[in-house]
Image: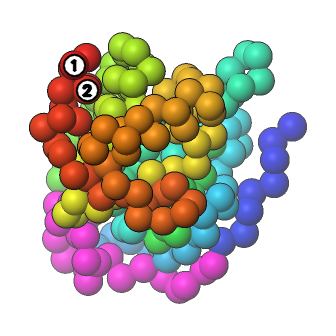
């Protein structure tokens, strides 16, 4: 059974022309003539941490461009476990499989508060047929999503438990400005890395003890990166 989708906060119709991340988002290549072809509303939606954008197996009626926050894409394994197959970051697209398949092949869940634009499939099919620029952009996004998924599996599921945790910390540091970074619940990290919760907690504590990270809150979610070179050495097995 497909679980019921969590309701989001609808904030109106998106202003694609004035979008703050338009240069890195799906519609970056569109011009004024292309925008005149958009006849269906593109919704501006806000989701809170833990809310579900769409479910694995749900009928696909559109896709989502992420303007702010982080989304995890989750698939269920045959034995009932969850595996996080990719993180969606600002400028990326969730649900690209909707262009070629009738149903979503993963579940999309907000890891932080996220702001997204939900684009109906009819808009994309119409624009792709009439705008070579958008068609090329869609193909580039698709290729980028596939590469990101391959890189995710290659980097985060290779090596010792310590290396896996270090790779995830490094990825989060790269995706956030400055030296401060946010990690996830230990359960989420375990699902990303195919590790037990206790193992993840132990390895994060080791990075703090070894002076690689400094904890900034009691919840164990906010950290400061103190030694990037040492973190890379851990990633490489040092």
Pointer 2 and pointer 1: residues touching (CB < 8 Å)?
A: yes
39 or 30, which is in the foreground? 30
Give the residue displayed 72% in from the left and 69% down from the top: 7
**Residue 35 in the image: x percent, y percent?**
28, 73
Image quadrant assignment for residue 52: bottom right
Give the residue displayed 37% in from the left and 45% down from the top: 208
Image quadrant assignment for residue 164: top left
Tell me if I can see residue 116 in this picture.
no
Query: Farthest right residue?
Result: 1
Left or right: 51, with 64 as reference point: right
Badge 1 element: loop
**Residue 203 in the image: x percent, y percent?**
45, 32
Magenta span has 154? no
Q: What separation in Å lies between label 2 and label 1 (alpha carbons)?
A: 5 Å
With respect to residue 107, does 35 lie above or below? below
The residue that mark 2 highlights is 234
Dominant SS in magenta = loop
Give the residue displayed 16% in from the left and 71% down from the top: 31
**Residue 118 in the image: x percent, y percent?**
50, 64
Magenta-drawn segment: 9-33
Quarter in which the C terminus is drawn:
top left
Badge 2 element: helix
107 or 42, which is in the foreground? 107
**Residue 102 in the image: x percent, y percent?**
62, 37
With respect to residue 101, does 22 lie above or below? below
180 or 61, which is in the foreground? 180
With respect to residue 238, does 220 lie above or below? below
Give the residue displayed 58% in from the left and 42% down from the top: 186
Q: Residues within 10 Å of mark 1 (few under 14, many from 20)?
A: few
Tell me if I can see residue 183 in this picture.
yes
Left or right: 29, with 75 as reference point: left
The residue that mark 1 highlights is 238
């Amino acid at each position: 059974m497909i679980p019921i989708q969590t309701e989001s906060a609808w904030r109106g119709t998106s202003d694609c022309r004035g979008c703050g991340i338009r240069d890195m988002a799906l519609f970056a290549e569109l011009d004024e003539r292309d925008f005149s072809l958009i006849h269906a509303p593109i919704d501006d939606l806000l989701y809170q941490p833990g809310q579900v954008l769409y479910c694995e197996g749900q009928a696909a009626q559109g896709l989502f461009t992420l303007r702010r926050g982080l989304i995890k894409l989750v698939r269920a394994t045959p034995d009932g476990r969850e595996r996080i197959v990719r993180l969606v970051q600002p400028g990326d697209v969730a649900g690209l499989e909707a262009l070629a398949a009738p149903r979503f092949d993963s579940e999309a869940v907000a890891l932080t508060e996220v702001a997204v634009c939900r684009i109906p499939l009819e808009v994309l099919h119409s624009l792709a047929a009439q705008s070579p620029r958008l068609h090329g952009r869609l193909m580039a996004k698709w290729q980028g999503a596939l590469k990101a998924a391959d890189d995710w599996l290659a980097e985060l599921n290779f090596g010792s438990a310590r290396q896996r945790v270090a790779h995830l910390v490094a990825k989060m540091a790269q995706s956030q400005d400055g030296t401060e970074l946010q990690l996830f619940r230990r359960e989420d990290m375990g699902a990303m890395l195919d590790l037990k919760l206790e193992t993840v907690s132990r390895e994060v504590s080791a990075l703090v003890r070894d002076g690689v990270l400094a904890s900034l809150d009691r919840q164990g979610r906010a950290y400061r990166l103190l030694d990037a070179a040492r973190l890379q050495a851990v990633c490489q097995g040092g």
